[in-house]
Amino acid sequence: MRNLTFQRLVLISDSKRLANQFTFPKRLNLITGKDNSIGKSTLAKSLLWSLGCDPIFDQEWKSNDIKSILYFTLNNKEYFTCRGSHSIIFGAIDGTAKRYINVTGEYSKDFSDLINFRMKLPNRIDGTLETPPPAYYYLPFYIDQIKSWSSPWDSFENLGQYANWKTSLIKYFTGFLKPEHFDIEETIYEFGIIKKESVVKIEKFNNAAYVIADNSAVSPIALDNEEFSRIQEEINTELQELISYQMNLYDAQATITSNIYDLERQYELATSSANELEEDYKFAVESIPTDNLECPLCGTLHDNSLPNRALLLSEKDSLLDEAKSITSKIAELKSSLAKLNEDAQFATNEIERINKKYITDDNTNEKGLIAQVINTISTENVSRNIQVKIDNEDLKISKANSSITELKKDQRKILSTKDKEELNSAFMSKLLGNIEALGSTGINLNKVKSPTDYKQLLGGGAAEAARGLLAYQLSVLQQIHGVKTCIVPPFVIDTPNQQEQAGHRYETIIKELMRSVPKDYQIILCAMENDALNEFKHDANVIELNSNRLLNASQYDSLRAEYKDIQLAVRGHSEDD
């Protein structure tokens, strides 16, 4: 199986003129030390941050304003990322490299293409399917010290940008959702756009029809077919040009009225959003005493600093400016509509004038009837055209619904029920084996049927529960290895001695990591010095941190020059951050 392997990490702090570098030359790598506050977790997180993930760093580390370079190999080819506070550079050694302003969007797609990660998720705004950032790719391969030991699939910040993503992600990694599923999902989304556009058009057409009916309401006309045909023939001969002009006026009135309707909705949205931002600002200032606010749903930490609060006011002003611009556009359209109404009145007067040609002493009683017929013919022509357009959009919606139904059938055919049962069976077999090997048989698996049931791992004491979650994580890794979902990165596990494991239990955990993690995976293990690590250390590259923490002054100049060379190679003339 193809894999991604870390080689060297460079960390630089310009604000403090400190730097350091760390190498990872072997499959097994141990980041250790005698103190629990020397930066083991921070070093591991910096590897993932360099790829574009957002681990949870403490404020002291953030104050360093870190820049990094991560060198890694993929199928014996060398690549690198170079990340600062405002951009990330990604490329091949001795090849091309490119700068990206964000880790989302284009960078996510290019990086995912390299590692064959073909997962797609719908964004919260309009449901557009996107390639998620690297954090979503790395979730099954990272056990952090803070959250993962109690809440799997939750080890990074900023994971709330997609709704209900965990089930789809787990199914993708463990083989239940094939890449073809997302190819079809994109086509389904395109048909959904067609439906939405047609619904909007139908609403506009209905509004236009209402305007015409409201402006030209007449009483029903009682005519036999012969009489109606006679009058219509005369009118078509005498008034065709005028009626055509009147129809154009009606169309223009309907279009402008529809546009005014849309702008009024936009104005309401802009003013409402501005008011909400005003309330957000008041809440941020009056109710939140700290510079951070944790989301109660996803745990994401949101910036509540003074600059960020000022940004709320700036966005509010922008929305109010937009509302003012919309008001001006509405006024212009209403002015145009008033002019059209004048023209329509002129056309009506002309019809009445020409209508007198048909009024003689012999047919005075028909005067009102003829006027009604003239008006009916012109308005019905426009209304008929609008109805044709509505029928066409209804047909588009019907065809889109039929296509979506067929596409969903195709999705269900990608993996048969038997295939799904075999995948579940394979996963449960792995989970039971790992539960047994880690000595966490007190975990109740009665409600666990598939990889998505991780919340149903119940029972056991605190230490046993931690081993149960590790058994689940190892089972997921083994399942990914079997179904070959994507190119696998290093497995990073932070401090497996959770809940003060008994000595023999901790030794079992370390041995199982060495035995159970597939040989294709590079392992980055963070742990304090302990005799249970002796066998692991024997075959590992050991990075022993001391009280000097992660950064020092001695390497700053040389490593800063290395970082600068990369920046100049990409930009050609000046530095990045």
Image (tube, rainbow, N blue to C red):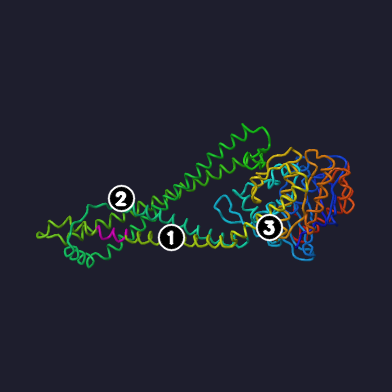
Left or right: residue 234 compared with residue 164: left
Chief SS of the magenta region: helix
Q: Nearer the viewer, residue 30 or 20?
A: 30
Tell me the residue at 59%/62% (across/down). Answer: 414
**Location of mark 3 (residue):** 107
The reply to whether residue 246 is in sight is: yes
Magenta span includes 467: no
Label 3 and label 1: CA atoms lie apart by 37 Å
Q: Nearer the viewer, residue 514 or 45?
A: 514
Specify the farthest residue to the left: 362
Residue at disc 3, secondary structure: helix
Image coordinates for residue 336, horizontal then vertical, percent: 38, 53
Residue at disc 1, secondary structure: helix
- Among numbered discs 1 and 2, the one appearing first in the sequence: 2
What segment carries the magenta color?
375-383
Left or right: residue 6 compared with residue 220: right
Q: Nearer the viewer, residue 475 or 251?
A: 475
**Location of mark 1 (residue):** 398
The mark closer to the camera, 3 or 1, is: 1
Identify residue type, mark 1: Ser
Q: Quadrant of residue 95?
A: bottom right
Tell me the residue at 65%/51% (across/down). Answer: 450
Residue at disc 2, secondary structure: helix
**Location of mark 2 (residue):** 214
Tell me the residue at 33%/58% (across/down). Answer: 249
Label 1 and label 2: CA atoms lie apart by 30 Å
Magenta span includes 382: yes
The mark closer to the camera, 3 or 2, is: 3
Image coordinates for residue 231, horizontal then vertical, percent: 19, 64
How packed is label 3: few (under 14 Cα within 10 Å), some, or many (20 or more)? many
- Among numbered discs 3 and 2, the one appearing first in the sequence: 3
Is residue 234 positioned above or below 508 on the image? below
